[in-house]
Structures are given as structure tokens and as C-alpha cells.
Amino acid sequence: MRNFALPMVLVAGLAGAAPVQAQTDLGDVVSGIAQSLITQELDKKAYLEAQRLNTVRGYRNYLAQYPKGIYRVNAERALVALGASVGPDPGRPDPGNPAVGSNAAQVEASLGLSRTQRERIQRQLTVLGFPTGVADGLWGSKTRGAIIQWQKKNKLTATGYVTARQVNLLAEQSGGSVSPTPEEPAAGNDQLEERLLSLTSAERYEVQRRLTALGYNTYGVDGSFGSNTRRAMASWQRDEGLRASGYLTADQLRLLRRQSGG
């Protein structure tokens, strides 16, 4: 009630001195001031709740409720500190002009490249003089580094992630193509890639802890990826604009670690 005291006293004083015909207008002013104070208080409470959670989902919920809120800049800075993308719709980046970081990863993920396609791109990079090591479809640091060097040579934004245009350019330069392989579903690739990661029990514990820390509750940290963990993983992937398969890829594991501080 303290927040309303001064404005109400001032308005009450004005009301005593105002002519009778001005009472209606003055009532509108009182209503407007009260509504503004209520809105500010709700804005503050929503931000404090996001700050208490200190998760990607918490800050995004605040921004969704108050896109022009008093604490908008603070919430956006907190998202950046957590390693998350900032924007009106982080799940729909501009594929023609990808940004460095999470958005670039989202653009690549939206392509739905199969493992066969990823192997072919690795071979194309190697043929062009940017060795990726074994062409296994699992894009680790060596493949990402090769993509960055190829992007630099072609005067493209060096993100380490490919766009649809860059996939076509690679095919043209190497004399090959990256045709779709519908018999190998993309979601199945994620499941296979997670299996090939051969996560240890300690790493599975780590994944569950990190998801929970970011606000995606796995309902227990036991080193076993059951239905609750899969749902939490899929929710995190969806919020990051990635394919919500519920299975973790090598790139996503790196992103999860970066977002949760490690």
C-alpha cells in the first residue's frame, strides 16, 4: 500500500480544489495512476521470480509476459550469461543471416541433416583441403574447426555451423551433392548419435543436473534417462529451437554445458 500513498494524497488534494465538472476527468487520472502502479508491481514480481529461478525458461517467460517490461534489458543480459539466444522468437532464426552462437546452431539443426548427409559433408570438406578426420557423421571440434576455416576462406560468417546455402556451395565446390535420405529419419539419427556418444553414468548424472539447473526438471538425478529426463531434454531442445527428439547429440551436449556454466 505504501506505493500508492503519495499519488493518492496528491490526487485527493487536487480533487478538493477541482471544479465539479472536472471530477470525471480527475477520476480517470486516479484510475490511470493506480493501474500504472499495479502494472509496475506485477512486472517487478514477475522479474524477481525469473531472477529467483535464474533459468533460461524463467527469463523467457518474463519476456513473453512483459516484452517491453522495466527489467527487459536485465532479463536479456541474464539469458546471454546463461548462454541462451536472445530475440523475439529464438526458435525461428533467420536462415539467410545466421548469428554466431546459438542461432547458428539452430539454423543448422533446422536443416534436419541425416547422418549420411553429415558424413558426405565431412568428405567434401576434406576434398577441399579442410580435413575433418574420420567421416563418421558425428561433428566434433575437428569438423567444426574445418567448417570455420572453409567459411573464412569463402568470406562467410565463421560460425562453425552450416546453412542450406553453404551446404549447396560445398556440394558445388567439391563436385558432389548432399541429397536427402528419407529412409534415415532425423530423429533416429539423434538417438543413434547419443548411443555413439557412449555417455558414462557420471556424464548422465551431469546431464540431468544441468537440465534441472536450467529449469527443466528431470525429477531425480539417477544416471538413467527415463521418460522424465527425455521430456525435460525435449523441452530444452524445443526452447532452443532444436529438433525436440529427447535424445542428446554431441553439439547439444556442448551447448548444455556452456549454458549451465561448464
Image (cartoon, rainbow, N blue to C red):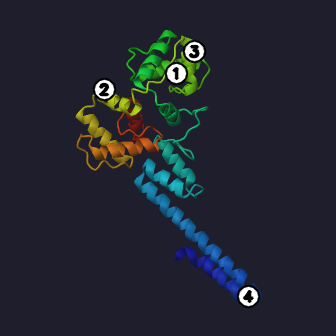
**Dot 2, how many residues are within 10 Å of its Cα: few (below 14), some (14-19), or many (20+)?**
few
Q: Which mark, residue 70?
A: none
Which quadrant: the C terminus?
Answer: top left
Residue that label 1 marks:
148
**What secondary structure is marked by label 3?**
helix
Q: In this view, does 130 lie to the left or right of 23?
A: left
Residue that label 3 marks:
172
* Pointer 1 with pointer 4, Cβ within 8 A: no
The nearer-to-camera label among 1 and 4 is: 1
Residue that label 4 marks:
17
Residue occupying image coordinates x 34% and y 42%? 210
The nearer-to-camera label among 1 and 2 is: 2
Counting from the top left corner in percent of width and height, residue 16 is at 70, 89
Residue 120 drawn above or below residue 47: above
Nearest to N terminus: mark 1 or mark 4 = 4
Nearest to N terminus: mark 4 or mark 3 = 4
Counting from the top left corner in percent of width and height, residue 5 is at 57, 78
Query: As drawn, which residue projects farthest toward the front?
Result: 183
**What secondary structure is marked by label 4?**
helix
In the image, what residue type sits under mark 4?
A: Ala
Residue that label 2 marks:
196
Question: Which image quadrant for residue 255?
Answer: top left
* Pointer 1 with pointer 3, Cβ within 8 A: no
Q: How far apart are marks 1 and 2 (CA)?
A: 24 Å
Nearest to N terminus: mark 3 or mark 2 = 3
